[in-house]
């Protein structure tokens, strides 16, 4: 099989650069006229996949909104991941896991191993127990043709406290994370180790051009950023950017035709900025 990075690149070339977030906030379930329980969650999340599964290359379910409903919510997440496979779209499960290496290996087995009930094409991970704590996770992703997205420069203002701190090397902590991802992808045009870099962060001076992996960029829409901000944030790395939006897109629902029209509009906007193919 082909690695995650290459599979993503070819699907983005076909469908355009957009990651559809699935964040079924309780308030959104109410706004869609659905009950705030696992049945409402299921209707909402699976409506997103039914509306966009053949249009958008990758979907990012936010695990928190499924976990909120306990075991029934996790069962819904399993079905959503299966729907995405059936639709021919990629799944990027947003779980932001980060722990000591031996525990991370168990998280990796839960989300990145063939046959695991919650296996996704990629997951989000946190490097703030040290990038090295992710080694086993990256190894499993490589072995199973899956991907990881490591938090580097997050979209929230509080992230600067850690990410813009100076490491002992004199580099910003975020720069060390970027360099470590570039090393993990060395020799590949499109590797399996991606980074999370918010669309809201403006110019940071951090060079992302050597990462050679997908650059997930949340913050579009509800957090105030738009396609116009991407050039400033990403500079020479723009072709690796995967813009992500959740609330902006889901607010168009519950009518599947309206969700689709909104996604088409966003894809067109992103294509004016992010070169694909
Ligand atoms: O990893 C993420 O996706 C993520 C990283 C980040 O820096 N900022 C960020 O908002 N996110 C996620 O993106 C989603 C927010 O999307 P919006 O509703 O479009 O703002 C949530 O699921 C966040 O957890």
Image: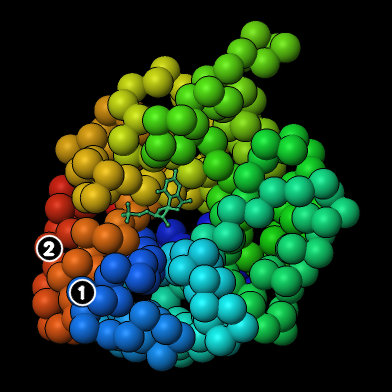
Up-down relation of residue 114 to residue 61 (above or below): below
Identified at 56% across, 72% down, the residue is 67
* Position of residue 37 measured from the top left corner of the image (x, y, whole percent): 42, 83
Identified at 63% across, 39% down, the residue is 181
Q: How is the image coloured?
A: rainbow
* Position of residue 169 measured from the top left corner of the image (x, y, whole percent): 70, 12
Up-down relation of residue 32 to residue 246 (above or below): below
The residue lying toward the viewer, choosing from 105 and 185, is: 105
Identified at 71% across, 59% down, the residue is 142
The residue lying toward the viewer, choosing from 243 and 238, is: 243
Is residue 146 rendered to the left or right of residue 84? Answer: right
Q: Secondary structure at mark 2?
A: helix
Is residue 76 rendered to the left or right of residue 266? Answer: right
Whether residue 102 appears in this view of the structure is: yes
For residue 265, which numbered disc appears in the image?
2
For residue 15, which numbered disc appears in the image?
none
* Position of residue 54 measured from the top left corner of the image (x, y, whole percent): 31, 81
Which residue is denoted by mark 1 in the rendering?
Answer: 31
Q: Earlier in the sequence, mark 1 or mark 2?
A: 1
């Amino acid at each position: 099989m082909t690695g995650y990075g290459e599979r993503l690149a070819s699907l983005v070339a076909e469908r355009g650069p957009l990651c559809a977030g699935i964040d079924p906030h309780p308030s959104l379930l109410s706004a869609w006229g659905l009950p705030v329980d696992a049945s409402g969650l299921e209707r909402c999340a699976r409506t997103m996949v039914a509306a966009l599964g053949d249009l958008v290359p990758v979907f990012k379910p936010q695990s928190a909104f499924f976990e909120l409903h306990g075991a029934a919510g996790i069962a819904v997440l399993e079905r959503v991941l299966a729907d995405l496979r059936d639709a021919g779209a990629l799944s990027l499960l947003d779980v932001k896991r980060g722990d000591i290496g031996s525990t991370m290996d168990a998280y990796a087995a839960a989300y990145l191993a063939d046959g695991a009930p919650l296996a996704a094409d990629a997951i989000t991970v946190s490097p703030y127990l040290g990038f090295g704590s992710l080694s086993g996770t990256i190894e499993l992703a490589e072995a199973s043709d899956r991907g990881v997205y490591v938090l580097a420069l997050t979209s929230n203002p509080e992230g600067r406290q850690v990410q813009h701190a100076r490491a002992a090397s004199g580099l910003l902590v975020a720069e060390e994370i970027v360099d470590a991802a570039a090393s993990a992808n060395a020799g590949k045009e499109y590797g399996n180790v991606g980074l999370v870099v918010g669309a809201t962060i403006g110019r940071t001076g951090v060079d992302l051009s050597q990462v050679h992996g997908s650059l997930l960029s949340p913050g579009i829409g509800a957090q105030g950023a738009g396609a116009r901000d991407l050039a400033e944030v990403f500079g020479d790395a723009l072709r690796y950017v995967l813009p992500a939006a959740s609330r902006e897109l889901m607010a168009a629902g519950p009518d599947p035709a309206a969700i689709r029209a909104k996604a088409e509009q966003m894809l067109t906007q992103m294509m004016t900025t992010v070169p694909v193919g």
